[in-house]
Amino acid sequence: MRIYLFKVPSILRIISFLLATSLLLFILSLYPGRFSHVVAPDCNITSPSGDKTIISALAEIEMPKPLKEPMLIISMLQNTLTLSDGNIAIKTFKANFETQLRQGEYYIKEKTITLPIINRNLGSRILFVRRRDRTTAKALVAKPSNFLIHGESTLGKKVSRDSKGIILRNRDIEEIYDYIPVGTKVMVTSN
């Protein structure tokens, strides 16, 4: 019968991690309430003595400004969604399509955030997209005139035929959600 003992270096790493965590918690307890609030990007927080704190340093980081003419360009051929400001492409994201979309101009009809019910990772931000120009009922049934842009953990996997939408990585939909107001133009292209 063999008895395995922990290696000394791994025990030392665990002990040093626990000591560092305890020290950090102790230091934070010396300043109650100082680190418990959310900082807006444009605020300037200083300590009571006038010295700038870590939080004020974070507040000085320049956040991207709102886009003047936000637009989403969806390429069915390249499987991408591009966030642009007018004619200037800001960032391109990999996307999966749950169904073939009709080419044309759409707009963001509604924005919503689903609340996680069972698993905290199931909450998602969703953009509801509607077609600008209405066509015949047959064409609307053949290809959807409304679809969703949403995040999900199924990126890169086969998706259901029943759902109509574009899947982005959760972090990608989180990134673009605040830049896209209701009414934003969405262009779907085949190239």
Image: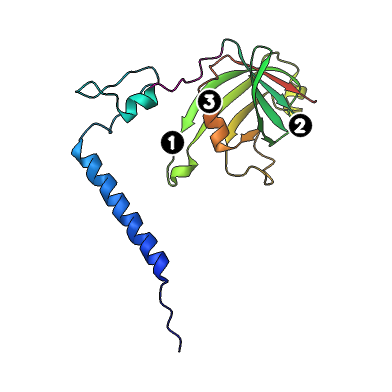
Find the distance from the CA under tag 1 to the CA under tag 3.
15 Å
Magenta-colored span? 60-67
Which residue sits furthest bottom? 1
Q: Residue 156's spot in the image, x, y percent? A: 67, 44
Q: Residue 168's spot in the image, x, y percent? A: 61, 35
Q: Nearer the viewer, residue 128 or 88?
A: 88
Q: Residue at x 59, y 19 (%)?
A: 108
Q: Residue at x 28, y 45 (%)?
A: 24
Q: Nearer the viewer, residue 3 or 8?
A: 8
- Graded by Cα atoms within 10 Å as few (under 14), some (14 to 19) or many (20 or more), the crowding at tag 2 reads few
Residue bearing mark 2: 78
> Looking at the image, is mark 1 or mark 3 earlier in the sequence?
1
As shown in the figure, which amino acid type bears the numbered disc 1?
Leu
- CB under 8 Å between discs 2 and 1: no
Q: Is residue 63 magenta?
A: yes
Q: Is residue 163 magenta?
A: no
- Label 2: element kind: loop
Q: Is residue 7 left or right of residue 48?
A: right
Q: Residue at x 30, y 27 (%)?
A: 53
- Label 3: element kind: helix
Q: Quadrant of residue 146?
A: top right
As shown in the figure, which amino acid type bears the numbered disc 2?
Gln
Please state, as top left, top right, bottom left or bottom right, where the N terminus lies in the image.
bottom left
Residue bearing mark 1: 115
Instruction: Give the main secondary structure of the magenta stretch.
Output: loop
As shown in the figure, which amino acid type bears the numbered disc 3?
Tyr
Residue bearing mark 3: 177
Numbered circle sitting on residue 53: none
> Looking at the image, is mark 2 or mark 1 earlier in the sequence?
2
